[in-house]
Every structure is written in structure tokens, then in C-alpha cells.
Image: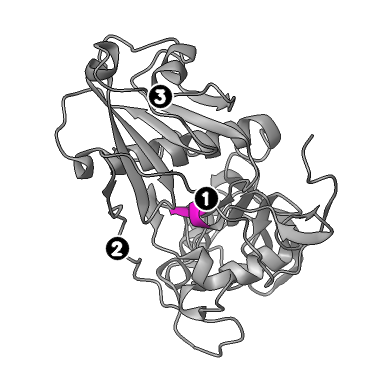
Amino acid sequence: MNPFMTTQAAWPLACIMMALSGGAALAGEQPATLPVAPVPSAPLVFAGSNAKMRAAWQQHLTLGAGDVLNFASYERPELLRTEVAIEPDGRVSYLQAQGVVAAGLTIDELRERMNAELGRHIKNPRVIVTPVAFKSRKVFLLGKVVNKGAYTLDRPMTILEAVAAAMGLETGLYQLNTVELADLPRSFLIRNSKRVPVDFEKLFIRGDLSQNILLEPDDYLYFPSAIANEIYVLGAVLSPGTQGLTSEATGLRAITLAGGYNEKAYGQRVLVVRGSIDQPRTFVVNTAAILAGRETDMRLEPRDIVYVRDKPWAKVEEVVDFAARAFIQTMVTTWTGENIKPLIKHPILPMLQY
């Protein structure tokens, strides 16, 4: 029986992380540091900061579906139209200018396009466009937060502010103590196809506000479960994905349950990744030696990643980044597919770059 019987809203800044299970290191263990994308050019702004610098997306603010506008014509008060929403297809209408594409344009660009469209029907139109509400820019909070889903980015918002808006991280009761259910070492932020280097342990446990960066439109914040009794078999297998962990789970057994290798798999060496995404413990499983009886198969632990590469490799550093990316991709696509399909039509799967 799962000891975490109840969940409740977490204090946004209080994170008592479940310790990741350790395990004796095998002879093939190698420390590795996962390469990550450089920190984006957007300025770091702490919660409560009065910094006047704006992020790149704020310096060139464009419109999108859901944004609300007022339209007026100079010295023609009777032509005022208020709270006109941009349609889901990115188009907006005003007077005879019907179905004008507004998505991706600035306010000034839309005004010029409206003048051009109305110029076919009205002599010397002078349209005034005033924004009422920006609702098109969203960030997504997934996984072990209390209120999961999409949040409108209508003002500067940091990671802590976004988690607070989602009512904090989920908690559970274990031996009469309240514990966080989020796996902070494996939590991640995805932006423009790349993982942003944020240390969630430093931010939530140590209060290091240098990690509290501003979010940008379409950012994905994901907090995996710290109590999931599962493993992830990814890469060149027939049925990659999540498996429940049993007492008999080993590397080769997990690959067998995933349908075995596909036609591109390099099956001689398999990588097992354990622990943090940024500083993982890595193990090389020599499948040829195991099948020949020279070595024993590796016992797996909760949340281990078993990764099969599609080409020969010699060094762990050549493979660990691919394993981490496959894990991130699997977590987001699986979670969004099962929980919030109406909110995210095209999840992270086509975004991650290999």
C-alpha cells in the first residue's frame, strides 16, 4: 500500500524532498554532467524585484489568439468596437476588414494592416487599436503541482510566482510528517526546444533566488513524482515508456518487457541513469557479458532510466544527454496526453532537438 494516503496544497516555498534511493555502485559506474542549453538572454529577475529590464519577448510584443482589443476610428466615435477577441485561428475583424490575420503582429503592425484593408472601402481610414488583455501567452505547469495546467503570462512571472499561482507543490503524509511529492532533482524547465539550467533543489530547498528566473511564453515546468515506483525504458526498443518496478526488475528484463530491441538498436551496451538529471549516476550494462554468463544482470531501482542507443558508443558522455532528453520527452508527452489534452494540442515531443 502506498504510504502517501492523502495529498494537500503545499506551501509554495517549503520543499522537503523525498531522498532518492541510493544503491551500491557497480564497477561500470561513471559520474557524468549533463550538457544543457546556455542561459537565455532574458534577464534574471527575482521575485519582488523592481528591475526595469524587459525580456526579449516583451521588447517585441506580438498578438495571438485570445488577446482582447478595442478598435476605434479617429474622430468617428460611432465606430468604436470594444473587447474584440482575436479568434482561435489568429484572425480579427473590424468593420469591413473581416478576418484580418493578427497573430504574430505588433499593435502598430495590426493598425497598419487594418488601415490597408479598410482603405478598400473607406477613404483615408485612421484606425486606433488599443490592447485590453493579453491572453495568448501561456506557461504550462505539469506534474506534482496542486493546480496543473496552463497559466496566462500577462505580466512578468518567475518560477516561484508560477508555482505559487498553481497553489504550490503537492504534498503527502508519510509517518505523520508532511513531505513534498515532487522529485526536484529530476524537475526541469523546457524553453524553445532546450532545457534551461535551473537547479530546483537550490531554489526550493536552499532559497537560492539566482535560480528564480523569469518565465517566457510556452515555457514548460515539470515536476515528476518523487514516490513513483516505476522505471523508464527508452531509446531503441519496440515499446519505449514507463514500467512498474517489481522486485525482479533488471536491465535485460526491463528491455524484454519493452518488446526487446528494435532493428536499429545497439544492444551490446545499455546505459542506466540514476538520480539527478544534472549530476546523474551512470551504469553501463554489458549485455553480451550477461548473456554469456560472465556478469550478472543489474538490479533496477525506482525511477531508473534504461536507455538503448541506436548506434555504437564507447563513452558514457556520448549517451547520457540523449537519455536525459528521452526522459524529459517521455514525461511531458505522457503526462499531457493523459491529463490535459485540451490545453496542449502539440506537446513537447516535436520540440526537443536531438
Q: Is residue 339 magenta?
A: no
Q: Which residue is mark 2?
A: 38
Q: Is residue 238 above or below residue 101?
A: above
Q: Nearer the viewer, residue 57 or 98?
A: 57
Q: Looking at the image, is mark 2 or mark 1 nearer the viewer?
A: 2
Q: How many marks are shown on the rendered structure? A: 3
Q: CA distance from mark 3 to mark 2?
A: 33 Å
Per the model, the C-alpha gap separating discs 3 and 1 is 49 Å
Q: Secondary structure at mark 2?
A: loop
**Which is more foreground, mark 3 or mark 2?**
3
Which residue shows up at 61% across the image and 39% down it? 344
Left/right of residue 109 with respect to residue 99 in the rendered view: left
Residue 147 point in image, percent of width and height:
76, 53
Q: Amino acid at mark 2?
A: Pro
On residue 251, the disc is 3
User: For this view, does 17 lie left or right of residue 10?
Assistant: left
- Residues at badges 3 and 1 in contact (C-beta under 8 Å)? no
Disc 2 to disc 1, C-alpha distance: 29 Å
Is residue 348 visible in the rendered image? The answer is yes
Earlier along the polypeptide chain: callout 3 or callout 1?
1
Give how far across and how far down residue 155 sits, in percent.
62, 72
Residue labelled with disc 1: 103
Check disc 1 and report its element: helix, strand or loop. loop
Residue 276 sits above or below residue 214 on the image: above
Q: Amino acid at mark 1?
A: Ala
